[in-house]
């Protein structure tokens, strides 16, 4: 029996936690065998469940942080839209359109390092209305918030907080110097302390190693992350990473499969950059992934939700919320 099969059986039948050494050994495993095994693990813990979410760029551009991949950083000239925080009316109207299309989860995303207390009040107003006027599960991605801010947002109706680690600690200073890996972990811990679920993942193709990707996923598992967005770098002209090479679909599928082995109970969520893969993530959905961000991303086009629904339904999934 191969190492992949032995490890799969331990994960499936013994509650075994894949170690760093195990995951590194999977780097040289046959890709077809690995992805098939990862899909079996996904089926064991999730069945045919599939979770879609959609995001709104609720405040765009003029970000104080210097993340080298980001179109919204004030350090770079990318032509990305710039506007202030959307009103509660604007957020609720957009959310209702997404709900009417059958999308069950909605995430409010803001550019910038954090939120002011005034911003928190404005978003809280939107959250209270969304809780009252929709059945959506609501997520917020708003940077480095403190415990008191999370308490207020949870009271207003927030259920999940998102903050990607983006890359592993070793590589993080090459990607961003205006905040740290530990700053991000602190924000996630603050969210947990407030009783919120957390969503966190990273961007693949920032110049990191496969070992970095594994180490980041192990940190995510240790934090108790139940939703892990896996992005592919969509190199934006005007950013320092505009000429980085594209990730191959084979490499991406290996990452997704290994992430499934490491965190078998998490929703592995395909996010930004799926268009770079050439198949909208179809192969990755057969490699252990079982969630996605659908429709447009923050400053780039995503995959249309109707097209996404047909794609995953054709693969045998049963998406939450979508209307037949």
Image (tube, rainbow, N blue to C red):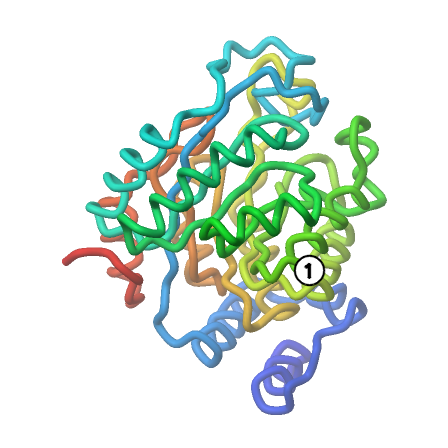
Q: How many numbered markers are drawn? A: 1
Q: Dividing the picture into quarters, in which one does residue 30 lie? A: bottom right
Q: Is residue 98 left or right of residue 281?
A: left
Q: Secondary structure at mark 1?
A: helix
The answer to which quarter of the image holds residue 278 is: top left
Give the residue displayed 47% in from the left and 41% down from the top. 124
Is residue 176 depicted above or below 248 in this figure?
above
Residue 82 placed where, x, y %? 49, 14
In-image side of 14 versus 119 (left or right): right
Name the residue at 61% across, 55% down: 255
The residue lying toward the viewer, choosing from 148 and 182, is 148
In the image, residue 306 lies at what x, y percent? 22, 45
Toward the viewer: 285 or 5? 285
Residue at 79 percent across and 26 percent down: it is 178
Q: Position of residue 139 (x, y in %)?
A: 48, 48
**17 sits to left or right of 100:** right
Q: Is residue 292 above or below residue 96?
A: below
| Crowd band around label 1 with a 10 angstrom C-alpha radius: few (<14), some (14–19), many (20+) | few
Identified at 50% across, 63% down, the residue is 267
Q: Position of residue 217 (x, y in %)?
A: 69, 58
Give the labeled residue for mark 1: 193
Most distant residue in the left direction:
324
| Quadrant location, the N terminus | bottom right
Q: Quadrant of the C terminus?
A: bottom left
């Amino acid at each position: 029996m191969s190492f992949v099969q032995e490890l799969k059986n331990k994960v499936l039948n013994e509650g075994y936690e894949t170690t760093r050494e195990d995951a590194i050994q999977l780097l040289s495993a046959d890709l077809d065998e690995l992805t098939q095994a990862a899909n079996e693990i996904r089926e064991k813990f999730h069945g045919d469940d599939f979770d879609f979410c959609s995001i709104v760029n609720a405040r765009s551009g003029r970000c104080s942080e210097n993340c080298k991949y980001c179109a919204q950083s004030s350090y770079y000239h990318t032509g990305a839209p710039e506007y202030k925080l959307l009103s509660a009316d604007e957020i609720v109207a957009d959310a209702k359109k997404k709900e009417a299309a059958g999308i069950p989860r909605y995430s409010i995303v803001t550019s910038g390092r954090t939120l002011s207390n005034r911003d928190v009040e404005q978003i809280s107003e939107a959250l209270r209305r969304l809780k009252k006027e929709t059945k959506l599960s609501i997520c917020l991605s708003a940077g480095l918030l403190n415990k008191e801010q999370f308490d207020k947002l949870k009271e207003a109706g927030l259920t999940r907080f998102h903050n990607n680690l983006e890359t592993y600690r070793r590589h993080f200073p090459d990607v961003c110097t205006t905040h740290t890996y530990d700053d991000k972990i602190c924000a996630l811990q603050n969210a947990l302390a407030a009783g919120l679920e957390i969503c966190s993942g990273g961007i693949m193709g920032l110049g990191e190693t496969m070992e970095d990707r594994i180490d980041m996923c192990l940190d995510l598992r240790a934090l108790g992350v139940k939703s892990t967005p896996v992005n592919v770098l969509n190199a934006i002209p005007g950013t320092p990473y505009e000429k980085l090479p594209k990730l191959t679909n084979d490499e991406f599928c290996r990452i997704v499969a290994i992430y499934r082995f490491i965190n078998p109970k998490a929703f592995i969520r395909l996010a930004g950059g799926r268009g770079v893969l050439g198949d909208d993530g179809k192969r990755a959905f057969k490699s252990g992934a079982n969630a996605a961000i659908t429709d447009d991303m923050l400053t780039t086009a995503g995959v249309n939700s109707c097209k996404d629904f047909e794609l995953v339904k054709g693969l045998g999934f049963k998406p939450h919320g979508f209307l037949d």
